[in-house]
Image (spheres, grey):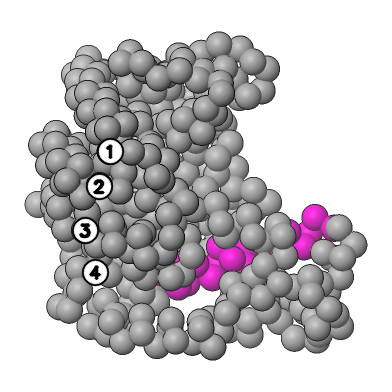
Amino acid sequence: MSKFFEVIQNDKETAARLGILHLAHGDVETPVFMPVGTQGTVKGVYHDTLRKIGYKLILGNTYHLYLRPGCEVLNKYGGLHKFSTWDRNILTDSGGFQVFSLSKLRKITDEGVKFSSHIDGSKHLFTPESVIDTEGVIGSDIAMCLDVCTPYGENEKKSREAMYRTHAWAERAIHHYEYLKENNLPHPHSLFGIVQGNFYKNLRKQSAEFINSLPFDGIAIGGLSVGEDDDTFVEYLRYTSPLIDKTRPHYVMGIGTPEYIFEAVENGIDMFDCVLATRIARHGTAFRDSGDISVIKSPFRGKDEPIDPTCTCTACKEYSLGYIHHLFKANEMLGSMLLSEHNLTYLYNLVERIKESIKNGTFKEFKRDYLLMRKG
């Protein structure tokens, strides 16, 4: 049994499972949805609110935190936990996705990624080693290694080249991480590898085998939810998931719709994150079992009822749909804050219900009934 992760219960009909991550800032039960706090904050939500909802693990972004406030400031405060006053766990992605999305501002070589800051144009270099160093300064409880994420539609030759580079960087990241630990130097508390291979099954299989062979604490499936259609996402999730070492936690980055969460859990994914919950909240959309609603629409003007009478968030306990509709029409920031809390509360409670269904052996039925309800 891994000291970092243990599986508590497996579902009898699917690959869904219950587990526990033993992290530096407290244990985290899985499956787990992680809110995204890109720049050291989940947009529009107090850390205390996240704690009250029940979240024990959130994300930070190495690229953004490296540029602002920068390692000097983070080091002065003793890391992101103290700087942001978040006393629970933090996972940091490597910043690779952000760097690679800046196609006109970066150059990828075997050494690493040279890029220009989107803030002031200053020149920087990310290497597998320097990213681990930065995540050590941040104080990451879980750190992702630097990888090459290729876009949907990339040809097989370029996808293979990117995969080989990802593998070489993964080896360098592991070696540097172990060096830091052995010499008692600042380092993340744990390190995850990333499977790539774009949408080519032969490459996915090869990448999974290679990443499995390295002593990462957990393994992520990269390069999904990058513009492909739903059927392709499901096909490659179902293909790749069984290839990953089952003794380690499995993570799919960037998924946050209820439909994708159910699909991920059914295929043995333990961890997932997305900015979607707070992003759509800022545009007036609220999650509900019966289907998402846009509170900005005219039918909600003057509605004297909550978004969801069963929800425990501040928006649902204290305010009417009519009032929240008014806040958005008046461009008041409280509307976005309330809906962000609602959507994060909704996803937290949904995952809790999923965990309960796995525990009770009813996951498959719960998924079927829930998705039918969502479709109306």
Asked if the residues shown at circle 2 and circle 1 are in contact, with their CB atoms under 8 angstroms apart, the answer is: yes
Which mark sits nearer the N-terminus, 2 or 4? 4
Q: How far, Cα to Cα, is label 4 from label 1?
A: 31 Å
Q: Nearer the viewer, mark 1 or mark 3?
A: 1
Image quadrant for the C terminus? bottom right
Q: How far, Cα to Cα, is label 2 from label 1?
A: 7 Å
User: In the image, what residue type sits under mark 3?
Assistant: Tyr
Tell me the residue at 22%/23% (across/down). Answer: 168
Span colored in magenta? 332-351
Which mark sits nearer the N-terminus, 1 or 3? 1
Q: Nearer the viewer, mark 2 or mark 3?
A: 2
Q: How far, Cα to Cα, is label 2 from label 3?
A: 10 Å
Q: Is residue 337 magenta?
A: yes
Above or below: residue 191 compared with residue 344: above
Which residue lies under the disc numbered 3?
A: 239
Q: How far, Cα to Cα, is label 4 from label 3?
A: 15 Å
Q: Quadrant of residue 72?
A: top right
Residue 15 placement, left or right of 232: left
User: In the image, what residue type sits under mark 2?
Assistant: Tyr
Q: Nearer the viewer, mark 4 or mark 1?
A: 1
Which residue lies under the disc numbered 2?
A: 200
